[in-house]
Image (cartoon, coloured by chain):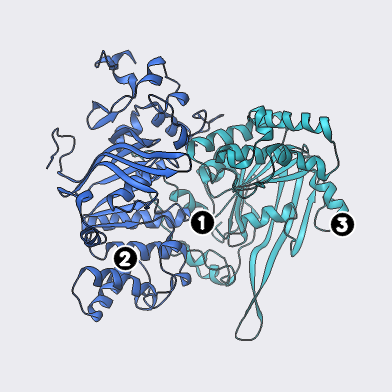
Amino acid sequence: MMYADDGAQPMAPLLEIENLRVTFDGEDGEVTAVNGVTLSVGQGETVALVGESGCGKSMTALSVLRLVPAPLGAIRGGSVRFAGEELLMKTVEQMQEIRGRDIAMIFQEPMTSLNPVFTCGDQIMEAITRHRVVSKREAREQAVEMLRLVGIPMPERRLYEYPHQLSGGMRQRVMIGMALCCAPKLLIADEPTTALDVTIQAQILDLLRTLKRKIGMAILLITHDLGIVAEVAERVVIMYAGEVVEEAPVRSLFKKPAHPYTRGLLGSVPKLDRKEEELKTIPGNVPSLKSMPSGCRFHPRCPNARSLCAKAAPALLEIGEGQRVACWLYGLPSDREGVETL
Amino acid sequence: MNQESDVLLEVRDLKKHYVLSKRTVFGRREVLRAVDGISFSLRRGETLGLVGESGCGKTTTGKCIVRLIEPTSGQISLEGEDVVGASPDRIREIRKQMQIIFQDPYSSLNPRMTVGQIVGEPFAIHGICAGKERRQRVEALIDRVGLTRDSYTRFPHEFSGGQRQRVGIARALALNPKLVVCDEPVSALDVSIQAQVLNLMVQLQKESGLTYLFISHGLSAVKHISRRVGVMYLGKLVELGETEALFSSPLHPYTEALMSAIPRPDPDIVRERVLLEGDATDSNHPPSGCPFHARCRYRMAVCENEEPAWRDLGGGHFAACHLR
């Protein structure tokens, strides 16, 4: 078992992903969606996993629950440890016990992740009875309690309603209620508010913060919205093209972003508090999995790229308290202390 | 302000009601009031942002203006010419002056047409030019929106979302329109690509003096691009004003809540959040009085019974609220 070695993470990690590799069989051969991702989530910690579409953030999360869509996708290597236990070695039955009880997940689209032919109550009660020995009545009482906890008015009545009778925000609350009914230690939230309106988004984020305090669970929040990151996360992991490019405590990330991609991402968000003539942009497009650039995968779009960047991929290097970055700006292979020359 | 010539588009009391097949207990058909009496005008060369949550009628408004949807009632005039009552022949002519860019760059481009055909189609429909001349003009448009020349013979599936949206923009600009209705043009794009497309739109506006109606639920994008912003709630405009004024001192409680709900990319911002309770009521069961009263934290007795009037509260800052 590995524990934090350097004061940057005071808590023992609850989830440790190491060197994870996920591949997909495509028409033109195998593509790598997740390429050697390493990250950890401490007990009770909220970590945001940030990146643009296709960067592998959702696949990384699905790997934790071993839900990578088979047979096209497969975990090819690495390790995923939860509370010290290797999840990649578990049997299918053991995983079913862990899913929902220890690790729960909520998805982006509440309409497609709830079953339309069962009532909300049935679906929450299923999650309860699956993992606990309780009578039907107890399960129903707990389901009502759960719905009340996530702020659904008239929970006794909602229990008998079907997903289509609820609004998007209410459905997402039901999803959260279902995910939390067994008090999981880790909640994986994959873009939980992307499909919702801003005022509803604010309600759901508020709810997640409150519940986290009450239950003390850890959250792995997958999002592309840096505003949400600033509001709820304690630590941030930035992914680009299947790799982690930067990892930092939330304040460091926003105050002194290190990786040129992180800086570009922050620069391209229109600011509400000042007027800019022109938005900063990252030139070019996100590379396709089929044709990944050599060396550092960001180099064709990077303003700081030099010849080395196309030849060799930089490893994650610690540059400050809890801040790690994979970029040649922060130390060449020959001169690892070259940070000053920036 | 020199009125008449300055105003490009005038919308007066626009309504779009849908009669539903469902009946009430009294046998009457229910009516969904998607857009329920909104009025605004667009000045030449400006960008008016239209914001609101899903189902508030902002897209319906945009589509009514270019008459992709027939309005139930109200007036729309472009440069003084009536759009609502225009004959089919006439509306074809008017549409040369106004174009629309859609939200989803995946479904708004015909997958079986090449980019050259897509961008050249407006020329074909309006019989403007053909052959070599059309090709030259299409290539010039492709250049203008920042795509490479070889895009001409390629198909939409070969492009990323941001590039497809550029194709959509090129098509909208083909006929040199005066007004472009932009319906969530960047909402489906990644953050870094959104910035590219927004910059392109600003640049094109500067070059050709375009007027934009920019419809979006992304408030930061709207703030960036718009000179004035209108806020819609349940089919009605609740506030409209200069962007700076609206964002710094919103007059309507709904605008205030909307602004406070935007997550800011700065972990040090501590601010009072106005959390709204519940969600927007169905637009087929509009509440009496002010449409927002059920969720409003300043609610008074009058709000439940009487609909607040749409008034200019000074400096072209309009709002419909009993508080003001």
A154 vs B27, left or right, is left
Distance Cα–Cα, label 3 vs label 2: 55 Å
In this structure image, what is the colour of chain A?
A: blue
Q: Label 3 sits on what residue type?
A: Ser
Q: Nearer the viewer, residue B99 or B229?
A: B99
- Pick whichever, B74 or A300, lies toward us: A300
How many residues crowd mark 3 within 10 Å: few (<14), some (14–19), many (20+)?
few
The numbered dot on residue B192 is none
The amino acid on which the numbered mark 1 sits, given as a three-letter code, is Tyr
Q: Which tint was used for chain B? A: cyan
> Dot 3 corresponds to which residue?
B87
Q: Residues within 10 Å of mark 2 (few under 14, many from 20)?
A: many
**In this view, which residue lies farthest toward the bottom?**
B26
- The answer for how far apart the CA atoms under marks 3 and 1 are is 39 Å
- Name which quarter of the figure residue A153 lies in: bottom left
> Where's residue B317, x and y in %?
62, 48
Name the quarter where the C terminus of chain A is drawn: top left
Badge 3 or badge 1: first in the primary sequence: 3
Residue drawn at point x = 34 percent, y = 78 percent: A156
Residue B158, percent from left and from top: 58, 38
Is the same chain shared between marks 1 and 2?
Answer: no
Q: Could you say whether the residue bearing mark 2 is in a helix, strand or loop? A: helix
Label placed on residue B254: 1
How far apart are labels 1 and 2 at the CA level? 31 Å
Taking depth in this image into account, of B224 and A120 the one nearest to the observer is A120
For disc 2, the marked residue is: A178
